Image: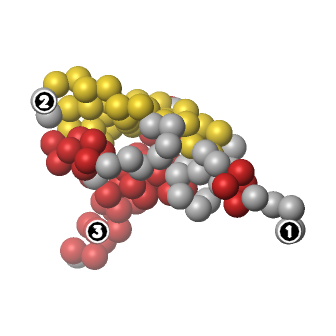
C-alpha cells in the first residue's frame, strides 16, 4: 500500500470516488451554468458557452457517483446529454422522488 500514489489512484475521479472512465456531457442553464463557470470542478473539464445563460459541460470522470450528486443538485437547470445510461439513471431517481413525495402527501 505504501507504493500507491493517491494522485495517481484518484486521477480522473470527480473528487474521491473512482471507477471506470466515463465521458459525461451536461447542458447547464441559469445559476447552474454560472456555478460551473465560477471555478474548476475537475482538472479535465471543458466548458462550451452556448449563450449568455447556457453552457455545455464536458468531462471524463472515473465513475458517476459523485458527479451524479452534483448534477441532481442543479435540478431542472441540468440536462444530461450523454451517456444515455446516466440520463436514464437520473430519470429513474426523479421518478422515485416524485412518487415518494406523492405518497407522503396522501
Q: Say the numbered circle drawn on residue 28.
A: none
For the point 41% across and 49% down, the residue is 41
Above or below, 78 against 17 in this view is above
Residue found at the very far left of the displayed protein: 52
Counting residues from the N terminus, which is met first, the one under dot 2 or under dot 3? Answer: 2
Task: Say which residue label 3 marks.
Answer: 101
Asked which secondary structure carries label 3, the reply is: helix
- In the rendered image, residue 100, in percent from the top left (x then y), is placed at 35, 68
Q: Say the numbered circle drawn on residue 52.
A: 2
Is the residue marked by circle 1 packed among few (<14), some (14-19), or many (20+) residues within 10 Å?
few
Task: Say which residue label 1 marks.
Answer: 2
Q: How many marks?
A: 3
Is the residue marked by circle 2 packed among few (<14), some (14-19), or many (20+) residues within 10 Å?
few
Is the residue marked by circle 3 packed among few (<14), some (14-19), or many (20+) residues within 10 Å?
few
For the point 57% across and 43% down, the residue is 61
Q: Looking at the image, is mark 2 or mark 3 nearer the viewer?
A: 2
Amino acid at each position: 500500500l505504501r507504493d500507491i500514489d493517491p494522485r495517481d489512484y484518484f486521477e480522473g475521479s470527480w473528487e474521491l470516488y473512482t471507477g471506470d472512465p466515463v465521458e459525461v456531457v451536461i447542458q447547464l442553464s441559469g445559476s447552474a451554468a454560472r456555478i460551473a463557470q465560477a471555478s474548476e470542478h475537475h482538472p479535465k473539464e471543458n466548458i462550451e458557452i452556448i449563450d449568455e445563460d447556457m453552457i455545455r459541460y464536458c468531462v471524463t470522470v472515473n465513475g458517476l457517483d459523485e458527479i451524479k450528486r452534483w448534477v441532481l443538485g442543479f435540478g431542472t437547470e441540468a440536462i444530461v446529454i450523454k451517456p444515455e445510461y446516466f440520463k436514464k439513471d437520473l430519470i429513474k431517481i426523479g421518478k422515485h422522488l416524485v412518487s415518494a413525495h406523492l405518497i407522503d402527501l396522501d
